[in-house]
């Protein structure tokens, strides 16, 4: 590629979707750069060498969407298994299904309530919250009542965010459905599954295009790199999906991010916990959850004498850590507005994805917003500039 028509910084799902659509539909030559040695961002996975068990290297990524357009788009690159995610929570030596369903309520209260009775019980326990909840704690209590909140949310959220739940946005908890049935699936979405031959194969197909070039090991914010903020911005349109604050050298101070420590272990047993994810919701266990990867692909043949587990812990992201979760605490909100104002003024650069917009996006949301960004922002601009 002589000179690209577009530089995409970051090969996560937002960046890959933009790159592929611009190459396919706008005929552009797209250069994708990423600091890492692989494409796919945090959704990337690879087999654990000694067992062949596919491990999501940056924590569990479960694909789910109800967006027809997103589903149709992703199916161009991969087929999906029929995996439906279920989570078990360990609380005081007992296992409960999550998210909150009639099964959770009845097990927790040692009852056999029907849906209407369970709703009435929880409504009484939620009555302390008045008005529209504007923080995670009030929102959670309004949905599930105080006792379930104290048991399943308070400790887990303290470990996950180390932030007063009254300072976290309510949207964090509304990621979890609340159901008055015995449906114990983690997600409500119409389409759910895992890429049949893995995330890496899916992403490799996305960038397999004559007008897409990928350069790995390239930090766009390092001026010594041949393609960098210093050399590219103003010369060629850029889509930036790295952390919004870092693009602007933290001029308004850093936004707060959480990172994960993932401690992997191969155990000499065929099955460690009987399911893919166990949340440890009590504070006496330091990790938030334990993932056992063989259970993500029950359709595959894996060894029956070895299993791979990952213990997941969350902590504040320092300057050199991978940012995973935007905290969006009360202290971040003004700063975020200041960065968004800078982003609007940055000519020729579109910010996108979880890191580039400082939003807690799932994979399907990143893809959906990339499809829309191409339609509404990139297609009109790039066609105009070519004309
Ligand atoms: N959460 C909780 N207890 C749980 C699971 C989730 O309190 O056992 C809360 C917690 O605040 C968490 C949020 O719900 O950050 C969203 O959970 P989700 O499983 O969507 O988190 P992710 O998988 O994105 O880390």
Image (spheres, helix red, strand yellow):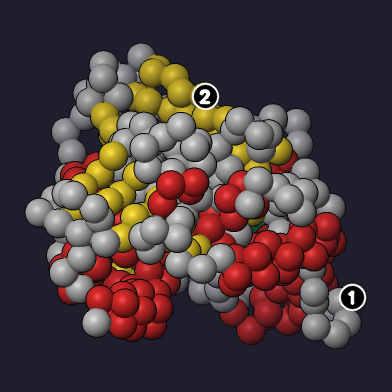
Question: Where's the C terminus, which quadrant?
Answer: bottom left
For mark 2, give the secondary structure.
strand
Mark 1 crowdedness (10 Å alpha carbons): few <14, some 14-19, many ≥20: few
Picture coordinates of residue 383, whole percent (x, y): 27, 80
Q: Look at mark 1 in the image and give the residue it sits on.
A: 128
Residue 29 appears left or right of 45: left
Residue 146 appears left or right of 354: right
**Is there a contact, CB below 8 Å, between mark 1 and mark 2?**
no
Which of pointers 1 and 2 indicates the residue nearer the eye? 2
Image quadrant of residue 237? bottom left
Q: Look at mark 2 in the image and give the residue it sits on.
A: 263
Q: Residue at x 34, y 55 (%)?
A: 7
Q: Residue at x 38, y 82 (%)?
A: 376
Picture coordinates of residue 280, whole percent (x, y): 63, 39
**Would residue 273 be seen by someone viewing this image from the given angle?**
no
Q: Earlier in the sequence, mark 1 or mark 2?
A: 1
**Would residue 324 be seen by someone viewing this image from the given angle?**
yes
Label placed on residue 208: none
For mark 1, give the secondary structure.
loop
Residue 15 appears left or right of 82: right
Mark 2 crowdedness (10 Å alpha carbons): few <14, some 14-19, many ≥20: few
Above or below 111: residue 55: above
Give the alpha-carbon distance from disc 1 to disc 2, as whole Å: 40 Å
Q: Residue at x 76, y 60 (%)?
A: 335
> Where ligand 1 lies, by quadrant?
bottom right
Q: Residue at x 77, y 43 (%)?
A: 162
Picture coordinates of residue 309, whole percent (x, y): 43, 28
């Amino acid at each position: 590629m002589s000179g690209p028509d577009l530089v995409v910084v970051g090969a996560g799902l937002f960046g890959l979707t933009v790159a592929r659509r611009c190459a396919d539909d706008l005929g552009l030559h797209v250069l994708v750069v990423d600091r890492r040695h692989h494409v796919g961002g945090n959704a990337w996975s690879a087999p654990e060498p000694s067992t062949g068990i596919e491990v999501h290297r940056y924590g569990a990524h479960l694909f789910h969407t109800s967006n027809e357009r997103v589903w149709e788009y992703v199916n161009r690159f991969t087929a999906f298994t029929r995996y439906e995610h279920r989570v078990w929570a360990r609380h005081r030596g007992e296992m409960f299904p999550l998210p909150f369903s009639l099964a959770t309520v009845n097990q927790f209260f040692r009852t056999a309530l029907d849906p209407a009775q369970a709703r009435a019980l929880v409504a009484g326990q939620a009555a302390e919250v008045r008005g529209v909840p504007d923080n995670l704690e009030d929102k959670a209590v309004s949905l599930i009542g105080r006792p379930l909140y104290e048991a399943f949310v308070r400790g887990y959220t303290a470990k996950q965010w180390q932030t007063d739940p009254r300072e976290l946005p309510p949207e964090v908890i509304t990621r979890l459905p609340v159901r008055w049935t015995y449906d114990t699936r983690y997600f409500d979405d119409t389409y759910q599954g895992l890429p049949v031959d893995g995330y890496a194969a899916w992403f490799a197909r996305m960038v397999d295009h004559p007008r897409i070039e990928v350069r790995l090991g390239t930090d766009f914010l390092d001026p010594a790199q041949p393609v960098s903020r210093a050399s590219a911005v103003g010369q060629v349109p850029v889509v930036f999906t790295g952390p919004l604050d870092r693009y602007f050298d933290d001029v308004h101070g850093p936004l707060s991010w959480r990172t994960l420590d993932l401690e992997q272990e191969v155990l000499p047993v065929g099955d460690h916990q009987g399911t893919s994810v166990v949340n440890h919701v009590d504070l006496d266990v330091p990790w938030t959850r334990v993932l056992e990867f063989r259970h993500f692909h029950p359709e595959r043949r894996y060894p029956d004498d070895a299993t791979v587990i990952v213990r997941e812990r969350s902590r504040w992201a320092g300057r050199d850590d991978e940012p995973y979760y935007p905290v969006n605490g009360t202290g971040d909100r003004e700063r975020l507005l200041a960065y968004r104002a800078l982003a609007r003024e940055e000519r020729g650069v579109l910010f996108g994805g979880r890191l580039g917009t400082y939003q807690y996006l799932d994979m399907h949301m990143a893809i959906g917003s990339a499809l829309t960004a191409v339609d509404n922002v990139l297609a009109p601009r790039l066609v105009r500039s070519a004309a």
